[in-house]
Image: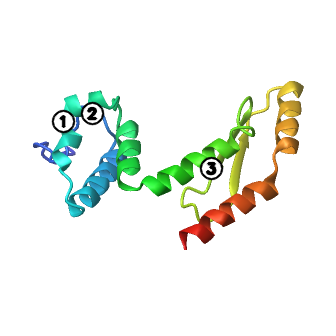
Amino acid sequence: METLPPRGAHENELPFRATQSEQRIIKELLSVAALRGADISIWKNADFLNSRAITTAADCIDALRAELFPQETQLRRQRAEALRPLNGGPVRTHFDQSLETSALTIHATIHNKTDFDLLLKRLQAFDFDRWREACESERINAD
């Protein structure tokens, strides 16, 4: 018979469901906030979280990252905005979350010729050289 570890009170109890991975990320971010002298108890308060429209673990992680790392969050938003013309329809594009490279991952689900044509149109309209230059500029400014 398999036994499970005891389920006691968790020090990171949150007012929403969170996977173990999300709990780990939130715990790490709260540790950074605590090291910086922030009052981390507010991030466990349902009223505070609701006032900021934080209703999921993903929302909480995004808000904590934005609070702790505002410049990095700004760069991620700028990259996401730059990829907006490429995304849509059958295409989903992701960038290097470390912000270290200009590498892109492109995922396309093609069901028919229309989807294929839309993929080609989006790829041809995207200026990768401009994307790469913007990413390199970010790294130069960060140094």
Instruction: Between residue 60 and residue 12, name the one nearer to us.
Output: 60
Where residue 38 sits, quadrant-wise, is bottom left
Q: Could you tell me if the residues under marks 1 and 2 are in contact, i.e. CB atoms within 8 Å?
A: yes
**x, y percentage for residue 130?**
78, 56
Instruction: Between residue 3 and residue 99, name the one nearer to us.
Output: 99
CA gap between label 1 and label 3 equals 32 Å
Q: Residue at x 79, y 27 (%)?
A: 111
Q: In this rendering, does residue 126 appear at all?
A: yes
Disc ID at residue 94: none
Amino acid residing under circle 1:
Asn
Q: In this rendering, does residue 13 appear at all?
A: no
Q: Is residue 86 left or right of residue 3?
A: right
Amino acid residing under circle 2:
Leu
Quadrant where the image shows the N terminus: top left
Residue receiving disc 3: 79
Q: Residue at x 23, y 42 (%)?
A: 43
**x, y percentage for residue 2?**
22, 45
CA gap between label 3 and label 2 equals 27 Å
Disc 1 on helix, strand or loop? loop
Instruction: Between residue 18 and residue 123, name the one nearer to us.
Output: 123
Q: Residue at x 15, y 48 (%)?
A: 11
Quadrant where the image shows the C terminus: bottom right
Q: Residues within 10 Å of mark 3 (few under 14, many from 20)?
A: many
**x, y percentage for residue 35?**
22, 63
Residue receiving disc 2: 49
